[in-house]
């Protein structure tokens, strides 16, 4: 699993960053400001740091990709152009979709589509369908909330409606992780798709890339 190293400063957008990172399929480690990352956490695939902390560190101290958060004037997350370093402007109203897309790109994982809708979740081999709510989809999996308790690696069948499709789409998946949404306290899961046919992959690509 990918690893993210989070180095905060005292600015107000960090709670929003932490909340958004709960929706990224990665292990997040935090380092107190001013402490060398190597002394507190294993090597990471992505470092997220405030520009005040970044300015005080020697160039090349990080491993993996780098995301430097500046106090920009823009209300949303904005990608800045620069060779080598990946820098963005950030505020407390960071756009969720933009943040997840940028983070996925820097981590080298599938881009995700936020999609909140009612979904059906059925345990493999069972008939009863539990109703849940999707949160985001990628080409490799999805996250969703569900009152029913699921176990790690449990096989499930997820069904949902795709705009433009003739009928509901049903995809097999395996539970990869569980977490609690910090905003509403709901029980959530992340699952990876398994055994997708070529037709199912095509439907999923059109859906994730929002091509109706």
Image: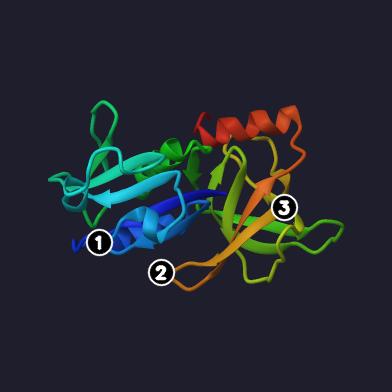
Task: Name the foreground residue: 115 vs 178.
Answer: 178
Residue 129 location in percent, x, y? 75, 62
Whether residues under marks 3 and 2 lie with C-beta atoms below 8 angstroms apart, the answer is: no
Residue 29 location in percent, x, y? 42, 59
| Residue marked by disc 2 | 183
Of callouts 1 and 2, which one flags the residue occurring earlier in the amino acid sequence? 1
Residue positioned 46% across, 54% down in the render: 42
Residue 10 location in percent, x, y? 19, 64
Task: Name the foreground residue: 33 vs 118.
Answer: 33
Residue 116's place in the image compared with 138, above or below, is below
Residue positioned 50% across, 42% down in the render: 112
Q: Is residue 159 visible?
A: yes
Residue 99's place in the image compared with 92, above or below, is above
Specify whether 40 is left or right of 192. Answer: left
Tell me which corner region of the image, top left, top right, bottom left or bottom right, holds residue 87: top left
| Residue marked by disc 3 | 174
Label 1 crowd (10 A; few <14 / some 14-19 / many >=20): some
Count of numbered labels shown in the rendering: 3
User: Residue 33 has which mark?
Assistant: 1
């Amino acid at each position: 699993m990918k690893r993210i190293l989070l180095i905060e400063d005292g600015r107000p957008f960090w709670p929003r960053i932490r909340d958004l990172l709960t929706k990224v399929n990665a292990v997040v480690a935090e380092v107190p400001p001013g402490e060398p990352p190597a002394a507190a956490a294993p090597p990471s695939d992505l470092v997220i740091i405030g520009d005040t902390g970044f300015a005080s560190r020697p160039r090349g101290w990080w491993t993996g990709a780098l995301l430097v958060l500046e106090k920009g004037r823009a209300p949303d997350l904005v990608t800045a152009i620069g060779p080598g370093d990946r820098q963005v402007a950030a505020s407390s109203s960071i756009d969720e979709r933009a943040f997840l897309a940028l983070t996925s790109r820097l981590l080298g994982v599938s881009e995700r589509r936020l999609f909140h809708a009612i979904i059906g979740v059925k345990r493999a081999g069972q008939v009863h369908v539990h109703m849940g709510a999707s949160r985001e989809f990628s080409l490799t999996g999805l996250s969703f909330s569900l009152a029913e308790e699921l176990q790690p690696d449990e096989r499930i069948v997820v069904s949902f409606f795709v705009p433009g499709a003739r009928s509901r789409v049903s995809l097999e998946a395996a539970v990869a992780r569980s977490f609690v949404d910090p905003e509403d306290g709901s029980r959530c899961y992340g699952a990876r798709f398994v055994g997708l046919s070529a037709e199912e992959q095509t439907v999923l690509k059109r859906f994730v890339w929002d091509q109706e």
